[in-house]
Amino acid sequence: MRRSCLRLKCPLQRCSMLSSMRQSSWIAVVFPTKRLEKLTREEEDADMPMFYNYWRKKTLNEMFKMDVLPLVFDEDKRSRMNINIEQEVFVRASYRSMYQRAAFLRRYCHDKAVLVTGQPGTGKTLWLWFMLVCVIASQKPVVFHYHGKTRLLHDGCVYLITESPSYFFKRMSNPPTRFQLFTWCLIDTDQRQLDPPMYLVESGTAIHPVQVSLPNSGTYLSRLKRKTTSFDMPLWSPPELMEGLKLDQRYQNVLTALTENNDTIQNCVERYIGLERLVQHYEASFGQLIASERVQSSFQWLLDQLILKYGPIPRDLYSAIFDDYY
């Protein structure tokens, strides 16, 4: 059997061959204790180790049933990750299907990296955190490169990787005598616009890179020295945009003020410059809706109007509503 399943011409032949493979024909990358001792362990009371061990107690089936994924690391859902993204992730249907596609490639075409591109603000980084939680819940080791830091999450511990650990990421055999399960490697280059370390993306290593990046080929393709499969982050539908808006803390503040604290419309609107201007601009429709305390209907109507102006990009739409962006 050839190494790459993509070389099989007939899809039916490929599916038949893949379905006949037994689990015992796969081996995973092993990290010997002596090699782990060469890395620096992150303190157990730091955010990432607590986050890792919290989600290790969950299962992949639990992840797939969640519509909202809180980036927390305790049962009270109070201790949240100190990261510059939303603290709750709306789990879109496309997030699950993209995870399944990436998992298929890791298992059957592991020499191909995955590159996820999309417009800024479409949720690529949020999807990567969803991927991280799914991999943790499936009890797999994972390398996570985020905000310039590279970590190895393995067997309940988080290790900081500060230089190229070539002894970790070599192929077991080339060509392999049996199919291998390469280590997940999740890479975010969208936030800092910096290239990831070369040992995370170059060919000939026993890791499976999944990289999210802006759609600018000059920032990654020239350095991604291995075959890639590209995923495009789908644009958001209006219902998804409304569900995402409900998770925005500013929307929750307006809703609470109007429905529970009996605050006035004027006081709520004045707290957010963008919202105040939108009420003035769409006074005949949006102003009347929100004044009648039909908050969800008024924001749904407002989203529909702003989609025509900015497109279905959640970051732009939510900024237009609450910030001085209109």
Image (tube, helix red, strand yellow):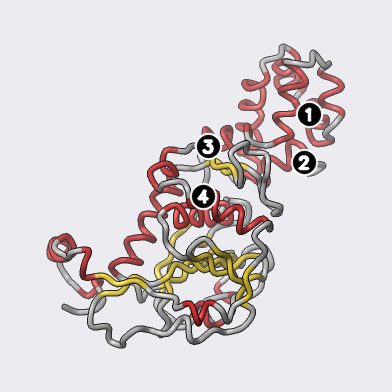
Is the Cβ of the residue at disc 2 closer than 8 Å to that at disc 1? yes
> Which of the labelled discs sits on residue 55, or is there none?
4
Residue at 42% from the left image edge and 57% from the top image edge: 139
Location of mark 2 (residue): 326
Mark 2 or 4, nearer chain start = 4
Residue 131 image point, x, y percent = 48, 55
Which amino acid is tagged 1?
A: His
Residue at 70% from the left image edge and 16% from the top image edge: 289
> Which of the labelled discs sits on residue 323, or is there none?
none
Which amino acid is tagged 2?
A: Tyr
Q: Is residue 311 visible?
A: no
Q: CA distance from mark 3 to mark 1?
A: 25 Å
Callout in the foreground (1, 4): 4
Q: CA distance from mark 1 to mark 4?
A: 45 Å
Observer-nearest residue: 130 or 243? 130
> Which of the labelled discs sits on residue 281, or is there none?
1
Left or right: 29 in relation to 130: left
Structural crowding at the residue carrying mark 2, measured as other residues with C-alpha within 10 Å and reported as few (<14), some (14–19) or many (≥20): some
Q: CA distance from mark 4 to mark 3?
A: 25 Å
Q: CA distance from mark 2 to mark 4?
A: 39 Å
Observer-nearest residue: 129 or 25? 25
Which amino acid is tagged 4?
A: Trp
Mark 3 or 1, nearer chain start = 3
Location of mark 3 (residue): 240
